[in-house]
Amino acid sequence: MVVTKAKYFKVDNKNTSIQATINGKDVCVPLDEDNTDYQNILAWVAEGNTIEEAD
Amino acid sequence: MALSKIDIENMVTGETPVANGGTGQTTLAAAGLTRPLSKPIIINGNQSLSQRTTSVTASDGIYCTDRIKHTLSNDGAATITQESLSSGSAFTDGFANAMKIDVTTADGSLSAAQKYHFRYNIEGQDIQNIKKGTANAEKLTLAFWVKATKTGTNIVRCYTADSDRSCSIAYTVSSSDTWEKKILNFPADTTGTVIADDNTVGMTFTWGVAAGSNFTSGTLATAWASNTSANDFVGQVNNLDSTSNNFHITGIQLEIGEFSSTTIPPFQHESFADNLTRCQRYFRSYGGGDAHEQIAVGYNSTTTQGATFLDYSSPVMRASPTLAVSANGDWKIYSIATAYECNSNMGASDTTPRNMKIFTPHAGSTTVGQGCMLQADNTTNARLTLDAEL
């Protein structure tokens, strides 16, 4: 799985999910460690990448 | 044939009563009743459901038929399809569908790390009854129908992530492009840690299609052992070495215990609805049924955003799912008899395995607090999917 972009989505000033591009597809990933896409994003961050802050 | 009597002794000893005039008796285990009243362990083993797509170009992490994940890295290319069967031994055995890998670009010389595998993951809490890692651990039997252009040795590997242990069993495709039923016996694993009783991956079966030397240079691990990649797919033929090659599979069945081709219980076919419901724990799809299909209802959270509530609590999904949608323009917020086309990526909050709130941006301007719906914008191409696969 290739993560190319990740940006927090915020509701009421709280990060609630991550809008990401994974394998070329735009998805919205919950902050749930059981979710495999979230696991992939955490691995992507561990490689030195950064999740953008929400607008 | 009338049943003249049921011998209580048979029931006590675990033998199946035999109709008057019947020949021989069968133990409950041999009759496939080791899991009485239960459903098949492998979901969608008959490949009848393909919620995402019925045809897709192979890529790492992709799914075609439900529950089968393809993992690959090679210089070839392939198309994965859900195919309808109309002839052959698998068809005459009751299977109307199969998963097919059609090689479209050959890779006849795999580098060390290259591969093509597909796998089936089982949740740990669904495989506790094999008692892995205990003195009472059970043997397993994996059965399936396979048809491949390339004859020769293929490998299926069983892996348990909690203990990082694996066991690989070889089978032979004897005749090119001919359906053959394979029965693979996996030994019991009495050592290593037990499988965690939770919703994470407990056991994985991986079918080799092609494997580079990183996976083939050792000795095939036919007994359970700490996982060593070089021992995983030793002897695996390269099914990617010609564009003439196809690889098909269906009727995937996992049984607890050791069975042969003569004792393996019949495949447990489920109704389409039961199969769909079980698959929806891992993936579900909305849209396509109507040009204005209504997905969720809610309220206008701002003048340029609808907040809608989507319930998917039956069945509860394995984990909080990833939300994906087709093109933004496929969707609209409908509020007070006016449509507002989605103009940017949707977001989500309060996502659980049961429900989520979806935020749909648009150019506005709606009245905050008034009701709204999320629906397709006059297209049957609109798709909204939830993914909680392992």
Image (cartoon, rainbow, N blue to C red):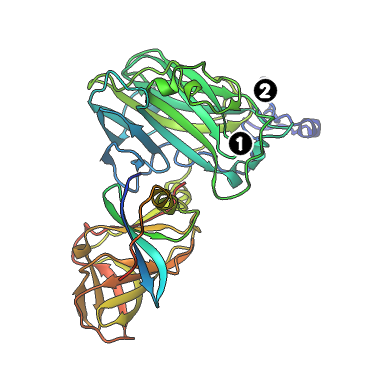
Task: Give the residue type at disc 2.
Answer: Gly
- Dots 1 and 2: beta carbons under 8 Å? no
Q: Categorize mark 2 by other alpha carbons within 10 Å: few (<14), some (14-19), many (20+).
A: few
Q: Residue at x 54, y 32 (%)?
A: B159
Q: Residue at x 37, y 36 (%)?
A: B70
**Secondary element type, mark 2:** loop
Count of number-bearing discs: 2
What chain does badge 1 belong to? Answer: B
Image location (x, y in percent) of residue B79: 26, 34
State which quarter of the image contains the N terminus of chain B: top right
Instruction: Report which quarter residue B333 is drawn in.
Output: bottom left
| Residue in front for this viewpoint, B207 or B100 | B207
Residue B82, placed above or below residue B380: above
**Secondary element type, mark 1:** loop
Q: Is residue B97 visible?
A: no
What chain does badge 2 belong to? Answer: B
Image location (x, y in percent) of residue B182: 48, 21
Q: Is residue B343 visible?
A: yes
Residue named by callout 2 = B21
Residue named by callout 1 = B163
Sequence-first tag of 1 and 2: 2
Alpha carbon distance from label 1 to label 2: 50 Å
